[in-house]
Amino acid sequence: MDMNFDVVSDTEKARVGGKPEKSVVREFSRVRVSWRVALYLGDRVVLGKTHDISEGDVSILFDQDVFSTSHVDLHLEVHRSALRAKDVIAMRCRVVYTVLTNGRHRAGFRIMQMHDNHRTLYRSVIDEKRKVLSDRTDDRV
């Protein structure tokens, strides 16, 4: 089940090949979250923490390189509030990049498949985070 997203943020830039002159428009704006992650690479499970998320992508920090040419399974432990139990969102992804930054491996994943109720939860968390950021910005004006 492929996911189709039609939200485009034309203000955010991504660097291609680490060279500023080759920047491209990001497809989705990002929100920062710090959730625990389990990445399933064949018979290995690698634990990490999210760096940021968007409707179509996830950036995660790991203690080891996780490059793969195959699709991988990710499980994200979502924290919505202190009063709510933790939810786990499962998704099938493709590794887009891996880079070593500040002694940690950061990897970007393109979301390929997600169960409908997981997608609904994932989008609602992103919307909640964006609303909080928007409210903070409105308070400063």
Image (cartoon, rainbow, N blue to C red):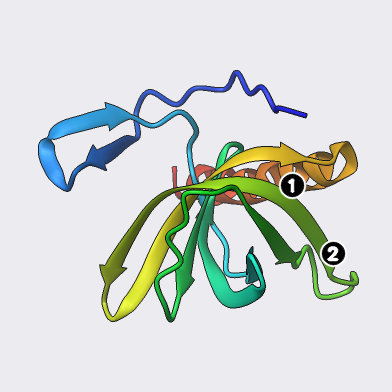
Residue 87 numbered tag: 2
Left or right relative to 92: residue 110? left
Q: Residues within 10 Å of mark 1 (few under 14, many from 20)?
A: many
Q: Residue at x 64, y 51 (%)?
A: 129
Secondary structure of the residue carrying tag 2 is strand
Q: Residue at x 55, y 72 (%)?
A: 49
Left or right relative to 76: residue 84? right
Disc nearer the start of the sequence (1/2): 2
Q: Is residue 31 above or below residue 49?
A: above
Quadrant where the C terminus lies? top left
Residue 58 numbered tag: none
Percent x, y of residue 78: 74, 64
Name the residue nearer the viewer: 14 or 81: 14
Q: Residues within 10 Å of mark 2 (few under 14, many from 20)?
A: some
Q: What is the distance, in whole Å, between disc 1 and disc 2 at their CAs?
A: 10 Å
Percent x, y of residue 48: 55, 75
Q: Residue at x 38, y 23 (%)?
A: 10
Looking at the image, the residue that sits furthest to the front is 43
Which amino acid type corresponds to the residue marked 1 in the rendered image?
A: Tyr
Percent x, y of residue 70: 54, 49
Based on the displayed image, in which of its 4 quarters is residue 90 positioned? Answer: bottom right
Q: Which residue is mark 1?
A: 122
Which amino acid type corresponds to the residue marked 2 in the rendered image?
A: Asp
Marks 1/2 in contact by CB < 8 Å: the verdict is no
Percent x, y of residue 56: 58, 37
Quadrant where the N terminus lies? top right
Left or right relative to 139: residue 132? right
Left or right relative to 34: residue 29? left
Secondary structure of the residue carrying tag 1 is helix
Based on the displayed image, in which of its 4 quarters is residue 79 positioned? Answer: bottom right
